Amino acid sequence: MKTRILLFLTICTATISSFAQFSFVHLSDMHVSSVPASNSDTNAQYFQCAIKEFANLHPKPSFVLVTGDISDIGNVGPYGMYPTITQHLFPASLTNPGVGDYFIDSARTIPIYFTPGNHEYWTGFDSIHIPVSGDTLFYYPHDVAPDMDYVINKDFAVIVVLRSGHDSPYGYPPNPDVIQGTGLSNEQITWLRNVLIGNSNKRKIIVMHHPPVNAAGTNSDGSPFTALAIDTATNSLEKNRTIFLNICDSNHVDVVLAGHEHQNVVANRKGDTINENWPNGTRYVQTAAAFNRSYRIISPDPEFVNVSRPLRSCYGTGVNESPNSINITVFPNPAVDNLLIRCAQKSGIEISNTKGQILKRLTAQDIQTTVDISDLTVGIYIIKVRTEKGISVVKFVKQ
């Protein structure tokens, strides 16, 4: 990266203040793939649908945070396909936007923050379809966000947004299925240490595109993830990975959020899969691809950072449903006393809160099941429906 940009990193933060407990939405890997958006660009349709849903969540999220691969090929003109994203954001037609300049709602109450992924650097493909990647972002800073690391600062939490770099070959000859990032520069490492030390009394969340720790998880539909995973560093960071992990340990970082792999998984430093709300150290969380409608809700409080189970947006909206998921209907949503769940097969149903605690379990023998939720407090809950054909996870709001 250019020296002037690295120097700028050491002094620049974006700060938001709040005195209340808050939550935010984590998205990754939109892969919008056409300019302008068309009926055939389902990835763009999912994004448009999802942000409308997020704007109507209760409680309302403080912001949405996107960890990379916003477009499919970010360095291909015109504008790296970013107009497909920005046409749905407010205010419209920004040029060279600053951190947090975009919002998902017309009232401009829910900002959306971005950090680049490896696809932001792609310029095309070579003769055997291995991606060609540059080391400079052309269109991303012009249309989406500055090419910089920054901080979102809350009274009891700090969210550190890092760039994890462009593509770096993994192995020789390069394996096209294993695309790691160049990682973190020495200047970024110094800046990160200073930010964390300066916020030692806060909950700490770091977000980046490439997962610092990898492990086998699940696809968006709950099926096993079968992509290549050589070790815990597969598809991770080439430079300063171990130093980064040490920084997380020594500064008691709560959560590191990432994407890139298009899977849902939570791991510890050793690569062991753990619960979303494991209490014994830094949790390395991956959220599956937004183009498969995946997201998570992150809810920090002064004592802990709660990470939701994987959620999926835009059911029953007319946007094409994933062929790998089972079709269920949850009505009404939001609900007050009773919830109606419809599924074509005999199913097992679990209702849990965003901390992952299972509150209700039942078996549905009929297509239609009524669940009493009058004993639940107001908030967001997750329904997992399991049948012989698969699993679907849907969220609902209790009013």
Image: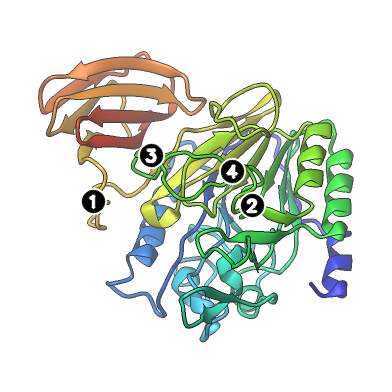
Q: Earlier in the sequence, mark 3 or mark 2?
A: 3
Contact (CB < 8 A) between labels 1 and 3? no
> Distance between the Cα atoms at labels 3 and 4?
15 Å
Residue 323: numbered disc: 1
Amino acid marked by disc 1: Pro
Q: Earlier in the sequence, mark 2 or mark 1?
A: 2
Residue at the image point whose x is 84% and y is 38% from the top: 199
Along the line of sight, the residue nearer the viewer: 238 or 29: 238
Amino acid marked by disc 4: Asn
Contact (CB < 8 A) between labels 3 and 2? no
Residue 236: numbered disc: 2
In the image, taking residue 323 as reference, residue 286 lies left or right, namely right
Contact (CB < 8 A) between labels 2 and 1? no
Along the line of sight, the residue nearer the viewer: 292 or 122: 122
Contact (CB < 8 A) between labels 3 and 4? no
Q: Is residue 309 above or below residue 171?
A: above
Q: Disc 1 or disc 4, which is closer to the eye?
A: 4
Residue at the image point whose x is 70% and y is 23% from the top: 303
Q: Which residue is mark 3?
A: 224
Contact (CB < 8 A) between labels 1 and 4? no
Q: How many marks?
A: 4
> Distance between the Cα atoms at labels 2 and 4?
7 Å
Residue 91: numbered disc: none
Residue most extreme to the top:
375
What is the basis of the colouring in this image? Answer: rainbow
- Is residue 398 at all visible to an observer of this figure? no
